[in-house]
Every structure is written in C-alpha cells, then in structure tokens.
Amino acid sequence: MTLTIRPGTIDDLPQVLALYNHSGLEHATTLTLADIEKWFAQMQKYPSYTLWVACLAERVVGTFALLIMDNLVHHSSPSGIVEAVGVAADLQGQGIGRQMMEVAIAQCRAAGCYKLTISTNLRRKSAHAFYESLGFTKHGYSYRVELS
C-alpha cells in the first residue's frame, strides 16, 4: 500500500484526534473534536500554517503541523517550525515519520527557508534519536513560560 502525505482537511480531524490521543504527546489526551476543529479553523487564518496527514488508503496514520513564517532577522528569510508530530502506534518504526519529515523539509526548501526547527519533550528519547537520524541537531536551549 502506498503512503500519501497531503494537507489535512476538516474531514481528517476525527482520525487526527485519535492519533493525538494515543501518541503520548503532552496534553493530547485532553483534546476533544471541538478543540481540534477550533484549532484547525484558527490555522486557516495563517498564510503558511498547514496540518499534514499521512494516509494509507483512507486511514490517517501520521500527522504533523508545519508553520512557515518570515523572520525579521536573516534578511527576512523564512523559517519553518514543525509541531504535533504523531504516527499510529501500530505503524511506528516503518518509515512514516521519516517520510513526513522529508515532506516538511522539502516544503521549507521550496519556500526558501533558512532553517526548520522542531521541539520535543526531554523525556522522549526515541524522538530525539529519530530527529537526529534525519539530520536535525541540538541547537541552544529551549525555554518556555506556562501561561495557563
């Protein structure tokens, strides 16, 4: 069966939600369909923010969000940010995540991005090894402040 990676639609959201709720992503298990529909509608307001889905036939087996944004530094060159990466638990280790990240990298290259970044929880050691196998390198520190 051939894997297809394409921009997601509102019809994909129930399957995307199921992936998130079984992915181990931080805060994912509290998401509802109403939450993800609201988030998806909000994404549509950004010029280059896309939910991507990886499909085997009609089944969504992977997903990620890619934001490409212009920066004030680097002579206004754009950069990409990947978030919310998930692959169906029964299909992990079969190259789906790799193919999704290849799409993200290709999208960023086509947009003239000078970098693509991704962050992952410190506890997700296997995710770190996966991203490093794709050529991502640790760079600096990531900080955050909880606002809610």
Image (tube, helix red, strand yellow):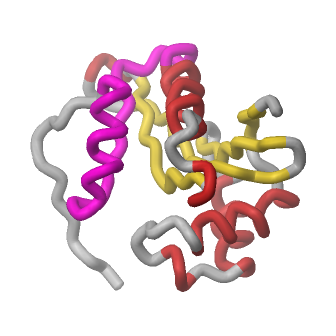
- Please identify the quadrant where the C terminus is shown: bottom left
In percent of width and height, residue 77 lies at 39, 20
> Does residue 63 appear to the left or right of 37 in the view shown?
left
Residue located at (57% from left, 71% from top): 22
Was residue 119 drawn as part of the magenta stretch in this picture? yes
| Residue 102 % position (x, y) | 53, 25
Q: Position of residue 26 (x, y in %)?
A: 40, 72
Give the quarter of the image for residue 33: bottom right
Q: Which residues are magenta?
A: 109-135
Horizontal side, residue 109 vs residue 77: left or right = right
Judging depth in this view, the residue of 36 and 69 nearest the camera is: 36
Q: Residue at x 64, y 67 (%)?
A: 39
Foreground residue, 146 or 104? 104
Give x and y (percent) for residue 46. Answer: 62, 47
Residue 34 falls in image quadrant: bottom right
> Image quadrant for the N terminus?
top right
Nearer-the-camera pick, 40 or 121: 121
Residue found at x 51% / y 74%: 28
- In the picture, measured across the screen, residue 124 lies left or right of residue 68, that is left
Q: Is residue 10 magenta?
A: no
